[in-house]
Image: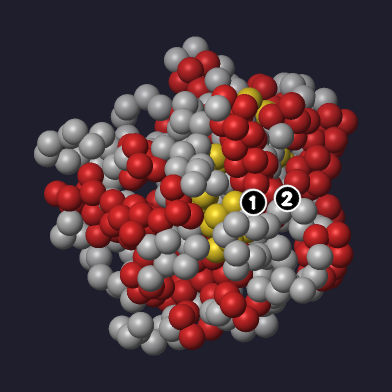
């Protein structure tokens, strides 16, 4: 691979070869790998590493070259930072690939594997169809990969027709769901509509409601602790943070005249009374008994992507807020949901598709009442329900318990730094839970298929 830019220091030179880190000298019992073996399918670099060299090729999309530093975590937020990075969420595929090379139960023998991981950077490859010169060929996205899998050791694919394979996609499913019959193409590629990939398990930041193979996994945040000490130190800070704002919205939109939930949030925040004193109650809020609140509502304007690589801009306000409002935007889900959880801020959802029906592996659906608030957006936008009335109606003891549950979720939604300490590796993070879920789903799928035969 010839690197076209030095800003990301040629990630290809930093990856350790798979063969050098796979050892089969340790038994299943000694390493706990029974039913957990994964084979990383060898793909030509045009399907992954070579794509990184195009990081500045699409003028309509942000240049992501600077964020390839630190194996895709991005530049540190400051020189002494050990856990905080300016992470680009597009690079989940890259980070997942690197973490997979550290997975303790890799095997070079596909016959031994319980699952096959495809290190294909689908969302990065999709940029040429979404923003580049191949927009009129977007229905072909994925066919080159399929042809390669068929023509090179095709038995690995054909033995289960791809049902034991999984891959990661770092953009919402809607970006890959254009019908193959649309002419001319509109928005998106047709990767998830190709029958060739119907059997593959797809770990994606936002899935659709119906396809069984799509499973949502958390967006990347900017917090990637390298050891247990840094994680515990952060959690201690979150627990000790003074919550001087009742509710916070960090995001853009809602400035037009069309009725929508973001506009309603902005209107309510702008009309809510607050005091600048740090030692008095919020005024004019009937039944409000949260002492020493400075603000009823705060807005962190993240219009035009200004927050995407600047976690300080929104994490400090989130640490000071009791509730973080998570309205849908172009799609139901938001990276901000996970930023807020990292800050110990109780999420408030307005659509079930924003989280409850998405992230069941990481945020168990049966626990939602324990850590989140749900307010139907229609009640706010069209029926005049005030968000403030709902939130101030929650007893303080219940709010305290909800925040405790949110804090307990922090390790489950973060992606720890590659090469992290053994102590931190003992705590399952978003990657561990995603891989475990993929293995279980593939195992169930294969058992059901064998039963039907």
- Residue 207, given in percent of the width and then of the height, sits at 48, 37
Q: Residue at x 62, y 81 (%)?
A: 20
- Quadrant location, the C terminus: top right
Left or right: where 282 falls relative to 356: right
Left or right: where 76 falls relative to 118: right
Q: Residue furthest top?
A: 383
Residue 189 vs residue 131, the one in the foreground: 189
- Between the residue at mark 1 and the residue at mark 2, the CA separation in whole angstroms equals 6 Å
- Can you see residue 413? no
For the residues bearing labels 1 and 2, Cβ distance under 8 angstroms: yes
Of labels 1 and 2, earlier in sequence is 2
Which residue is under mark 2?
A: 35
Label 2 CA crowd tier, 10 Å (few <14, some 14–19, many 20+)? some
- Residue 183, given in percent of the width and then of the height, sits at 12, 36
**Quadrant housing residue 131:** bottom left
- Residue 164, given in percent of the width and then of the height, sits at 55, 46
Label 1 CA crowd tier, 10 Å (few <14, some 14–19, many 20+)? many
Give the number of the disc on residue 434: none
Give the number of the disc on residue 114: 1
**Quadrant housing residue 21:** bottom right
Q: Residue at x 49, y 12 (%)?
A: 383
Label 1 secondary element: loop
Label 2 secondary element: loop
């Amino acid at each position: 691979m010839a690197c076209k830019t030095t800003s990301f220091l040629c990630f290809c030179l930093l990856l350790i070869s798979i063969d050098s880190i796979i050892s089969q000298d340790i038994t299943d019992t000694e390493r706990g790998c029974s039913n957990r073996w994964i084979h990383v399918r060898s793909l030509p670099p045009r399907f992954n590493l070579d794509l990184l060299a195009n990081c500045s090729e699409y003028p309509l999309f942000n240049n992501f070259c600077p964020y390839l530093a630190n194996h895709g975590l991005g530049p540190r937020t400051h020189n002494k930072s050990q856990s905080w990075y300016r992470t680009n969420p597009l690079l989940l595929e890259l980070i997942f690939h690197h973490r997979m090379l550290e997975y303790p139960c890799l095997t070079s023998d596909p016959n031994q594997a319980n699952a096959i991981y495809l290190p294909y950077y689908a969302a990065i490859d999709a940029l040429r169809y979404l923003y580049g010169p191949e927009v009129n060929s977007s229905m072909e996205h994925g066919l080159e990969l399929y042809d390669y899998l068929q023509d090179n050791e095709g038995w690995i694919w054909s033995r289960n027709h791809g049902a034991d394979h999984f891959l990661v996609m770092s953009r919402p499913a809607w970006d890959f769901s254009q019908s193959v019959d649309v002419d001319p193409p509109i928005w998106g590629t047709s990767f998830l509509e190709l029958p060739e990939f119907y059997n593959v398990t797809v770990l994606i930041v936002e899935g659709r409601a119906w396809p069984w193979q799509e499973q949502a996994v958390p967006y990347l945040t900017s917090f990637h602790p390298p050891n247990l000490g840094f994680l515990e130190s952060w959690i201690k800070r979150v627990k000790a943070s003074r919550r001087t704002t009742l509710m916070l919205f960090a995001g853009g939109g809602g400035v037009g005249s069309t009725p929508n939930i973001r506009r309603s949030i902005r209107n309510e925040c702008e009309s809510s009374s607050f005091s600048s004193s740090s030692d008095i109650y919020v005024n004019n809020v009937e039944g409000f008994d949260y002492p020493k609140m400075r603000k009823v509502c705060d807005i962190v304007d993240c219009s035009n992507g200004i927050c995407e690589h600047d976690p300080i801009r929104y994490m400090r306000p989130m640490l000071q807020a009791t509730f973080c409002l998570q309205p849908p935007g172009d799609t139901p889900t938001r990276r901000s949901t996970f930023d807020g959880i990292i800050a110990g801020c109780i999420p408030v959802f307005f659509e079930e598709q924003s989280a409850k029906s998405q992230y069941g592996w990481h945020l168990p659906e049966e626990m939602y009442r324990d850590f989140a608030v749900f307010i139907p957006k229609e009640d706010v936008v069209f029926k005049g329900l005030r968000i403030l009335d709902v939130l101030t109606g929650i007893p303080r003891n219940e709010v305290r318990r909800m925040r405790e549950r949110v804090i307990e979720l922090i390790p489950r939604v973060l992606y720890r730094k590659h090469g992290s300490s053994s102590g931190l590796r003992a705590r399952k993070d978003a990657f561990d839970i995603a891989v475990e879920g993929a293995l279980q789903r593939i195992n169930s799928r294969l058992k059901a298929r064998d039963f039907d035969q």
